[in-house]
Amino acid sequence: MNIIVCVDNKWGIGKNNGLLFHLPKDLQYFKEKTKNKIVVMGGNTLLSLPGSKPLPNRTNIVLSDEFKRDDCKVVETLEELKIELKKYNDDDIFIIGGAMFYATMLNYCDKAYVTKVDSVCEDATVFFPNLDDKSNWELESVSKPQEDSGYIIRYCVYRNKNKQSFFKIFD
Ligand SMILES: NC(=O)c1ccc[n+]([C@@H]2O[C@H](COP(=O)([O-])OP(=O)(O)OC[C@H]3O[C@@H](n4cnc5c(N)ncnc54)[C@H](OP(=O)(O)O)[C@@H]3O)[C@@H](O)[C@H]2O)c1
């Protein structure tokens, strides 16, 4: 299982149920990584997407007990999520947010694709766990810095050296 996120220098990821930055190149990177894959998200993140609609060309799975949808798969509990995710190849699964759902799933992921934006958004309200402070997460690669909409961004890949199995938590 993979996790993909865009963070500022303080690991901020959002405010007012929206993103902190509009970054077309990072969006393209996200699209390339997740195209034709399984994207899994919490209910608020689905509602934060354009038109509150699932992402095209991906299998969208949402964890929420607040709503039902017929345009994507909604699961109400983590146990139901486990049954659903068992249908797919683990490497094809991407956890795409938000803060609450990232925190829930982080320990079960092998790899984290973290876009770091060299900026601090002082009004961020939701955060991703700081992987640089976690001994089990190892920084595997960092891209060259790139400019994106006036910001400097770097694509980082972290590896979890102590991954736990999501599929064993209810056994
Ligand atoms: N920077 C990035 O890369 C990035 C990516 C994605 C999202 N975001 C941002 O993150 C923010 C949204 O994050 P969020 O924390 O508010 O919402 P979220 O994680 O998207 O959704 C939270 C909801 O998901 C369900 N959920 C999540 N974990 C659960 C668990 N362990 N057990 C049961 N249900 C669970 C619950 O749904 P119900 O209450 O409906 O049952 C919960 O209210 C937005 O600002 C968004 O823009 C940033």
Image: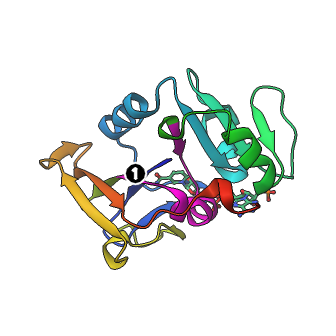
Q: Secondary structure at mark 1?
A: loop
Q: Is mark 1 within 8 Å of ligand 1?
A: no
Residue 69 drawn at (x, y percent):
83, 33
Q: Which residues are magenta?
A: 93-113
- Asked whether residue 96 is drawn in magenta, I would say yes
Q: Residue at x 39, y 33 (%)?
A: 33
Q: Is residue 34 left or right of residue 28?
A: right
Q: Which quarter of the frame holds ligand 1? A: bottom right
Q: Quadrant of the C terminus?
A: bottom right
Q: Is residue 55 left or right of residue 6?
A: right
Q: Please, what is the three-letter code of the amino acid marked with disc 1?
A: Phe
Residue 140 drawn at (x, y percent):
23, 56
Q: Residue at x 60, y 34 (%)?
A: 50
Q: Is residue 15 visible?
A: no
- The front one of 66 and 48 is 66
Q: Residue at x 40, y 44 (%)?
A: 22
The residue identified by callout 1 is: 21
Q: Residue furthest front?
A: 171
